[in-house]
Every structure is written in structure tokens, then in C-alpha cells.
Image (spheres, grey):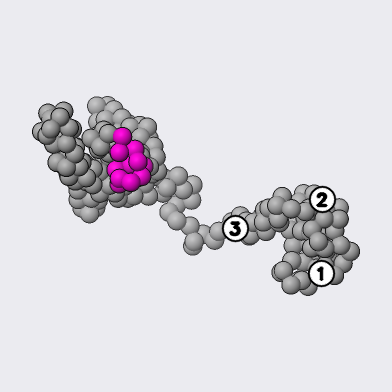
Amino acid sequence: MPRDEAGLPDSRVQWCVHVAGSSASRRECQGRRAPRKKGGRKAAEGGGKRPLVGDGERGAQRVDDLRLGERLRHVRRRPRADRLLGEEGQGFMVAMKTLDHTRPMISASAVGVSRRAPDESGAYAKDRKQFGQPIANFQAIQFMLADMATEIDAARLLARRAAWKQDSGARFTMEASIAKLFASEMATRVTHKAIQVHGGYGYSSEYPVERAYRDARITEIYEGTSAIPRLVIAAWVLKSYS
């Protein structure tokens, strides 16, 4: 198919063949203006530049959408039987089992993010002075540091248990969901306490705890929001009592 210097079809007919992958899309394509060749009649605006499918950003976006549609037309073909992942009709279960493998990694990531919170908070509490003494001497600050250390250690053990169960070859859906749920929410709580220790400075980008809070918050979202592991855990609990 002849193409111009931009890699687009040269005529309206060829453009429709390039874009359309079905009779419906070909009917939709009829009457659509193809990109003009370089050197053709100048557009009313744009200094003589060749329009794509409509002028401006919307036209360029339309071309990107059409190119994506052309690529997806080939992707939608039915795969051969020897290229299936798992058994036919079991694609959802394959996807869910994949989450079992990734949730322990999210747990470890949440533990890693949260470990910086007590380090930064402890150093800041020893340096920051209020009422003539470091705020590390105040019981309220000490309690927050103690809660941080306790929750981080518990989440680390849950993540290691899930990883151990995974390495053993046994089913570890329950352990992976528990570790992911607790570690992700723990990271948010711990980094929140770190911001509290820093006071107003904790909200400033000059201190790393605000970055740690944002990094911790995302662990509650990907690989299933906190509601999803709760559903999985509840299903396993109810199953054990049936």
C-alpha cells in the first residue's frame, strides 16, 4: 500500500482500507477525508501544514486512535489452542492466581516504605526541641514511635510467611491476602504518624516523610484495593467453618 513520508496511506480509499477492519468500520470510514499530500492545497489555518483527520490536537488524537484500532484489530484474533494460558474458559482464575504471586511483593514493598518512617521520625524527634528539651522526651512522641516499630515488625513477619508458603508450593491465597491487607494499611498508618511527629514540616517536601506517605498510600490501591483482600479472607474464613 503506497504511503507518504509520515507512513500514512496515500489516498482516501487506501486510508479506509488501512483503518477499517470490518464492514461496519468501512461504512463509518466512507466520506472521511484522508490526509492530504504534501504540497497540496493549503489549509485555511496552520500555515499550509497537511491536516490529519481534522485540524489541531483533536485531529492528531483521532489519527492515534485509528492507528490503535488497526493494531487491536489483529490482537482480537482468536489465539491458537497451543498458545492458551491455562485451560479454555479459566482466564479469570489464571488472573486471580497471578495476584496471589504479586501480593506478597506488595507487602514487602509496603514494609520497605514504612521502615523509613521511624528512622526519620526518631532522628527528627531527637533534634527538634520544644519547651527546652527534645520532643523525643515526650511520652506522646514515644508512643507513636513504639507503634511504628510494632506494626512494621508484624507486617514484615506476615510478608515473610506469605513468601515462605509460596515457596513451599502449597496454596497461599489466604496468607498473601492477609499480608497485603495488613502491610499496606500499616504503611499508611505508620507514615501518617511520621508526619504527626514532624508537625507542619512533615507536610513539606523539604522532609522525606511526605513522600513516604504518598508511596505508602498507593500500596492500598494496586493489586486489589483493601476491600478485595478482605473479601478473599472472609471467603476463606467462611469456607473453613462450612
Q: Are marks 3 and 2 in contact (CB under 8 Å)?
A: no
Q: Which residue is mark 1?
A: 38
Prevailing SS of the magenta stretch: helix
Tag 3: amino acid: Val
Q: Please determine whether, in this image, residue 9 is positioned above or below residue 169.
A: below
**Residue at the image point whose x is 82% and y is 50% from the top:** 27
Q: Which residues are magenta?
A: 200-216
Judged left or right of residue 56, residue 90 is left
Q: Which mark is residue 234?
A: none
Residue placed farthest to the right in the image?
Answer: 41
Point out residue 173 in the picture as x, y percentages from the top left corner.
Answer: 29, 42
Tag 1: amino acid: Lys
User: Is the residue marked by circle 3 packed among few (<14), some (14-19), or many (20+) residues within 10 Å?
Assistant: few
Q: In the picture, which quadrant includes the C terminus?
A: top left
Q: Nearer the viewer, residue 92 or 152?
A: 152
Q: Which mark is residue 75?
A: 3
Q: Nearer the viewer, residue 122 or 76?
A: 122
Sequence-wise, the earlier of marks 3 and 2 is 2
Residue 41 falls in image quadrant: bottom right
Q: Which mark is residue 27?
A: 2
Judged left or right of residue 218, residue 8 is right
Residue 184 falls in image quadrant: top left
Point out residue 198 in the picture as x, y percentages from the top left corner.
Answer: 25, 37
Secondary structure category for the residue under label 3? helix
Sequence-wise, the earlier of marks 1 and 2 is 2
Secondary structure category for the residue under label 1? loop
**Residue at the image point whose x is 86% and y is 55% from the top:** 44
